[in-house]
């Protein structure tokens, strides 16, 4: 069964950091782009960061300079390092790869 499983979410104060992990199983995702999306309360799901199979990455303007996406191909895992978190980063974060979504994980940033 092909699946993506997120971990690492939780509650953090503004200015703090969290690292999300997305462990993929059932398929080798090393040749696929992988990405993180988020959906805040009352908002549409949006792309946060994307990592191509070639190693390039790009980010939403709202997180540039604060978030970093990277992956460990040997572990078939993609990460999202989130620093200088703001209350507006509060959302359910989803991992995506090859048209497959993870179940989502809550990140809450308190002011």
Image (cartoon, rainbow, N blue to C red):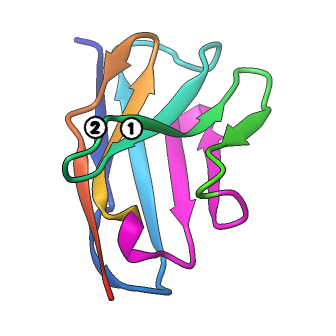
Pick whichever, 90 or 42, lies toward us. 42
Q: Where's residue 104, x and y in %? A: 24, 41
Q: Which residue lies furthest to the front in this view?
A: 42
When asked about the image quadrant of residue 31, the answer is top right
Disc 1 vs disc 2: Cβ atoms closer than 8 Å?
Answer: yes
> Label 1: which residue?
23
Q: From the viewer's perspective, tell me whether residue 100 is left or right of residue 31.
A: left
Q: What stretch is highlighted in magenta?
A: 64-88
Residue at left 66%, top 50%?
61
Pick whichever, 26 or 36, lies toward us. 36
Residue at left 37%, top 44%?
38
Q: Where's residue 60, x and y in %? A: 61, 45
Considering the numbered disc 2 on the image, is that residue within a helix, a strand or a loop?
strand
Residue 66 among magenta residues: yes
Is residue 48 visible in the rendered image? The answer is: yes
Considering the numbered disc 1 on the image, is that residue within a helix, a strand or a loop?
strand
Q: From the viewer's perspective, tell me whether residue 108 is left or right of residue 65.
A: left
* Mark 1 neighbour density, 10 Å: few (under 14) some (14–19) many (20 or more): some
Q: Distance between the residues labelled 1 and 2?
A: 5 Å
Residue 69 among magenta residues: yes
Figure check: 68 above or below 59: below
Figure check: 74 above or below 108: above
Residue at left 38%, top 38%?
23
Q: In which quarter of the image is the N terminus?
A: top left
Is residue 76 visible in the rendered image? The answer is: no
Q: Where's residue 16, x and y in %? A: 47, 84
> Label 2: which residue?
5
Residue at left 20%, top 47%?
42
Q: How many labels does the image show?
A: 2
Q: Where's residue 52, x and y in %? A: 70, 25
């Amino acid at each position: 069964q092909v699946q993506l499983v997120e971990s690492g979410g939780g509650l953090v104060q503004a200015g703090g950091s969290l690292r999300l992990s997305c462990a993929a199983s059932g398929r080798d995702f090393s040749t696929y782009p992988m990405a993180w999306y988020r959906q805040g309360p009352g908002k549409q799901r949006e792309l946060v960061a994307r990592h191509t199979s070639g190693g390039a990455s790009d980010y939403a303007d709202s997180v540039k300079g604060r978030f970093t996406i990277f992956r460990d191909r040997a572990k078939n895992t993609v990460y999202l390092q989130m620093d200088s978190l703001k209350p507006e980063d509060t959302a359910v974060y989803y991992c995506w790869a090859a048209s497959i979504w993870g179940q989502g994980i809550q990140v809450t940033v308190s002011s």
